[in-house]
Amino acid sequence: MKSITIDIINEKAILLLQDLELLKLIRIRKKKAGQKDATDWGRYKGAMSKQPIGEVDQQLNELRSEWE
C-alpha cells in the first residue's frame, strides 16, 4: 500500500474519489482539525551543519569500528 497527498482542484474530484473508495480501490483518510502532516520537515531545518564528506566518512568509520 502507498500513501499520497493530493490537492483537490475541482469538487467533482471528491465524488470520483468517493466512487473509488466504494469500489474498495482506495481508502480516504480525513485529516483531523489541527493535525499536521506525518512528516513535518521544517522542524529539522538547520539541525545539522554541513560537513566535508571526508569528515563524515571518518565519523562513520569510527562508529562502525565501535561495534566490532
Image (cartoon, grey):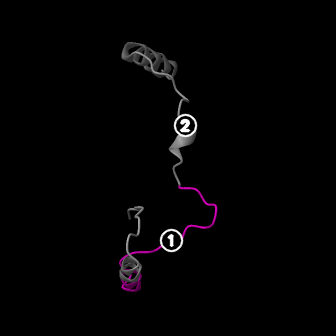
Q: Secondary structure at mark 1?
A: loop
Residue 34: % across, % down: 64, 61
Local crowd at mark 2 within 10 Å, few (<14), some, or many (≥20)?
Answer: few
From what the image shows, is residue 53 above or below residue 43?
A: above
Q: Nearer the viewer, residue 47 or 66?
A: 47
Split into 4 quadrants, where in the image is the N terminus? Answer: bottom left
Residue 29: % across, % down: 50, 71
Task: Please state which amino acid type lies under the numbered disc 1.
Answer: Arg
Q: Residue at x 38, y 70 (%)?
A: 9
Residue linked to disc 1: 29
Q: Which residues are magenta?
A: 18-37
Instruction: Please identify the dominant SS of the magenta region.
Output: loop
Kindly give the residue lying farthest to the front in the view shown. Answer: 10
Task: Please state which amino acid type lies under the numbered disc 2.
Answer: Tyr
Residue 45: % across, % down: 53, 34
Kindly give the residue lying farthest to the right in the view shown. Answer: 34
Residue 55: image quadrant is: top left
Q: Residue at x 54, y 47 (%)?
A: 40
Which of the two discs, 2 and 1, labels the residue nearer the N terminus? 1
Residue 10: % across, % down: 37, 75
Residue 30 forms part of the magenta stretch: yes
Q: Residue at x 63, y 66 (%)?
A: 33
From what the image shows, is residue 23 above or below residue 57?
A: below
Q: Nearer the viewer, residue 41 or 63?
A: 41
Residue linked to disc 2: 44
Q: Nearer the viewer, residue 31 or 55?
A: 31
In the rendered structure, the answer to whether residue 47 lies left or right of residue 11 reads right
